[in-house]
Image (tube, rainbow, N blue to C red):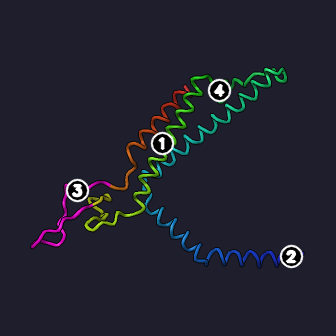
Amino acid sequence: MFRRLGKLLRAWELYSFIRNFSPTAYLVDRAFEYVFERLTLWDYLFLVASGILSLAFVVEFLDGLVQLVLTILRGLGAWHGVWPNWPGLRWLAHPTFGGVVAWFFIGLALVLALFVWLFHFLRRLWPEGRTGEVNRAYGGAYVHVVWQNHIGGPSRQWSSAQIRPRRVVSPAAWGFLLFGWLLQVLMWV
């Protein structure tokens, strides 16, 4: 038994060594570090709000499946009970047609919000790479700065008219997410 445990321990040590010191593990670690460096507080808030709405969406989906099974069992005469009327479970009983439509639009709004957020976040992962553009800390916030070269003047003169805020969550993503939350709250009320 101890010999088998020793073999398992050696296999685990070998696996840990390969995992920790392989080039692939290093690249994956650096990629995650690169991505997490570009996430801001607003991104985290957006993802938390999306995650909670996703959880409510999945609970509504599972509830719809449970209610469908109970309706089939009730129709077959195999079950004659009722859904518990407890305060925490009352809003889950018997989804109406309006509730199903609202559930569909909640899912659609959630998917659109996540796609818009992901599209804007992916643009932040790859710098645009054109000469004359750089991300800088400007006034305490990260901005995208475009400079202009003038003949006979300084090599880089900042153009304040072309400073665009960067590293923010798209207003469209927030709009879709807030619409989904509004529908979810209306379903609960």
Q: CA distance from mark 2 to mark 1?
A: 52 Å
**Residue 148 is one of the magenta-drawn residues:** yes
Q: Residue reaching furthest right?
A: 1
What is the total number of numbered labels drawn onto the structure image? Answer: 4
Q: CA distance from mark 2 to mark 3?
A: 67 Å
Mark 4 and mark 1 in contact? Answer it, CB < 8 Å: no
SS state under label 1: helix
The x, y position of residue 144, in whole percent, is 29, 59
Q: Which residue is mark 2?
A: 4
| Residue type indicated by callout 2 | Arg
In primary-sequence order, the first of circles 4 and 1 is: 4
Q: CA distance from mark 3 to mark 1?
A: 29 Å
Q: Depth-wise, is mark 3 or mark 4 nearer the camera?
A: 3
Q: Which residue is mark 4?
A: 87
In primary-sequence order, the first of circles 2 and 3 is: 2
SS state under label 3: helix
Q: Nearer the viewer, residue 66 or 120?
A: 120
Q: CA distance from mark 2 to mark 4?
A: 54 Å
In primary-sequence order, the first of circles 2 and 4 is: 2
Q: Which residue is mark 1?
A: 112
Give the crowd class for mark 2: few <14, some 14-19, many >=20 residues within 10 Å: few
Q: CA distance from mark 4 to mark 1?
A: 32 Å
Q: Depth-wise, is mark 2 or mark 4 nearer the camera?
A: 2
